Amino acid sequence: MDYLSLIFSPNVKIEENNAFIAKKSFEEQKKLAEAYKKIYGKHVPLLLIVGKGLPKPEKEVFLVRRDATTKLLIAYIRQKVSIQPSEAIFTFIRKKDEKQGSVIPNMDSTFGVIYDEYANGAFLIIDVCLENVFGN
């Protein structure tokens, strides 16, 4: 399956980590997410928050097809970022109420299901972290 048919980024530039959240009120985020969903109905809006150790992506807002899986997103990130073979990428989905913490998604879960369960009403917020792993 072609990654670009599943994952693409609208023209939203970032300046620093979490800049999108910091600069826009929740109502502005929700209005933008609704506009994306109206134009790209088969896609869900994601907001990637990159942790320490990973280079900042060119964009942090992505639209992902509802039938795309978490493992495709991780493969896409690995393709865009050069990391060592001894490093692994982990994704954490923030729950609607951030006080409840995050969950690690099943690699075969589709973003449509994840979005419906965990989106904050606007975007599905995903924390991406890098961790050292050992072995071959």
Image (cartoon, helix red, strand yellow):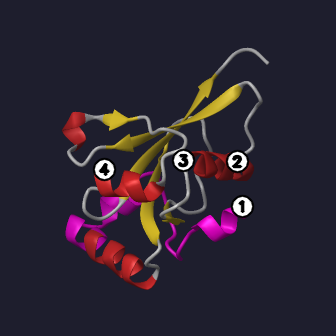
- Precedes in sequence: disc 3 or disc 4: 3
* Of residues 88 and 110, the one drawn nearer to the viewer in this rendering: 110
Amino acid type for the residue under numbered disc 2: Val
- Image spot of residue 133 (x, y percent): 66, 20
* Of residues 64 and 14, the one drawn nearer to the viewer in this rendering: 64
* Residue 134 among those drawn in magenta: no
Residue receiving disc 1: 1
Can you tell which mark lies on residue 81? 2
Residue receiving disc 4: 118
| Disc 1 from disc 3: Cα separation | 14 Å
Amino acid type for the residue under numbered disc 1: Met
- Precedes in sequence: disc 2 or disc 1: 1
Image quadrant containing the C terminus = top right
Q: Secondary structure at mark 3?
A: helix
| Disc 1 from disc 4: Cα separation | 25 Å
| Disc 3 from disc 4: Cα separation | 14 Å
| Highlighted magenta segment, given as a residue range | 1-29
Q: Say which of marks 1 and 4 sits in front.
A: 1
- Image spot of residue 105 (x, y percent): 45, 39
Position of 98 relative to 20 (above/below): above
> Mark 4, residues whose alpha carbon is within 10 Å: few (<14), some, or many (≥20)?
some
Q: Secondary structure at mark 4?
A: helix
Residue receiving disc 3: 70
- Marks 3 and 2: in contact by CB < 8 Å? no
Q: Residue at x 70, y 47 (%)?
A: 81
- Marks 4 and 2: in contact by CB < 8 Å? no
| Disc 2 from disc 3: Cα separation | 17 Å
